[in-house]
Image (spheres, helix red, strand yellow):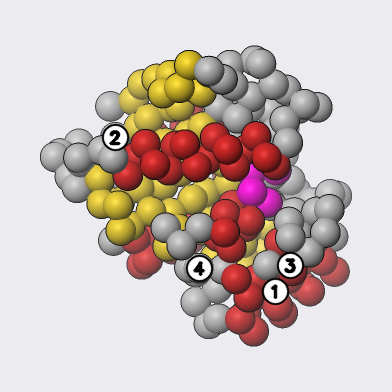
């Protein structure tokens, strides 16, 4: 069962909820959207996670068009995230002790930051999130690894022109040194957005393998 619901009016905050069958309580995954927005491919991610047994909340970080790719900030992202986090923790059919995040592209970076900032987050999956992008030590993922509150799975494409393999390998070294539960998966001959079925860079075989790793990670640490 899926629906788009406005959970805050000022500023407007639409959230796409996707719920598994049954009564729960369900583990939760909160989605940090990719740069194009809370579009059909992101809703597919939510629905696929719900089919696997997770209650999912996908946040429209552009606030129904009030913000855009140029006007959102990390502050607006986390203002909304905190609101969604408290909202889902108040629902009767969820397990508030089992909350994770998934993020894509810019949302992948936000997932790393959330892993460092919020003790509620028990597991993180980041698809092509930028490990070395930030303004300073407080918002650059590779500098926050020691603060991660739960296991992190980073997923990358080998030929991603926006994230070099040198940076991925450096991130891997730091991440795995911090915890054996952290993981990095790199898929050969694929680029940025390879999971997205609407992208010309979509690679079904690699996408299917990465998705299995995603479910494996969440089932291990949220179920």
Q: Residue 48 appears in which quarter of the rendering? A: top left
> Going from the N terminus, do you reach mark 4 or mark 2 first?
2
Residue assigned mark 4: 149
Total residue callouts: 4
Residue assigned mark 2: 19
Nearer the observer: mark 1 or 4; the answer is: 4
Q: CA distance from mark 4 to mark 2?
A: 25 Å
Residue 176 shown left or right of residue 31 in the figure: right
Q: CA distance from mark 2 to mark 1?
A: 33 Å
Q: Tell whether position 107 is magenta.
A: yes
Q: Residue 126 appears in which quarter of the rendering? A: bottom right
Q: Tell whether position 70 is magenta.
A: no
Q: Nearer the viewer, residue 164 or 91?
A: 91
> Going from the N terminus, do you reach mark 4 or mark 3 first?
3
Picture residue at 39% right of the left edge, 42% below the top? 86
SS of the residue under disc 3: helix
> Going from the N terminus, do you reach mark 2 or mark 1 first?
2
Q: Quadrant of the C terminus?
A: bottom left
Q: Give the number of the disc on residue 95.
A: none
Callout 1 crowding tier (Cα within 10 Å): few <14, some 14–19, many ≥20: some
Residue assigned mark 1: 172
């Amino acid at each position: 069962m899926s629906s788009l619901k406005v959970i805050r009016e000022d500023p407007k905050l639409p959230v796409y909820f996707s719920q598994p069958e049954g009564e729960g309580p369900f583990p939760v995954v909160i989605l940090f959207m990719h740069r194009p927005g809370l579009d059909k491919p992101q809703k597919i991610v939510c629905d696929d996670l719900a089919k696997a047994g997770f209650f999912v909340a996908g946040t429209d970080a552009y606030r129904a068009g009030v913000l855009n790719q140029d006007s959102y900030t990390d502050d607006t992202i986390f203002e909304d995230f905190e609101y969604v986090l408290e909202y889902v923790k108040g629902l009767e059919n969820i397990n508030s002790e089992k909350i994770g995040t998934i993020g894509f592209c810019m949302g992948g970076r936000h997932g790393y930051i959330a892993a460092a900032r919020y003790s509620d987050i028990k597991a993180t999956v980041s698809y092509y999130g930028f490990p070395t992008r930030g303004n300073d030590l407080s918002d650059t993922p590779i500098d926050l690894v020691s603060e991660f509150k739960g296991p992190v799975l980073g997923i990358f494409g080998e030929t991603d022109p926006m994230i070099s393999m040198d940076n991925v390998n450096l991130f891997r070294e730091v991440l795995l040194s911090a915890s054996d539960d952290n993981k990095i998966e790199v898929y050969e001959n694929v680029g940025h957005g390879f999971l997205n079925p609407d992208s010309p860079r979509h690679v079904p075989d690699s996408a299917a393998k990465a998705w299995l790793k995603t479910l494996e990670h969440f089932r291990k640490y949220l179920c």
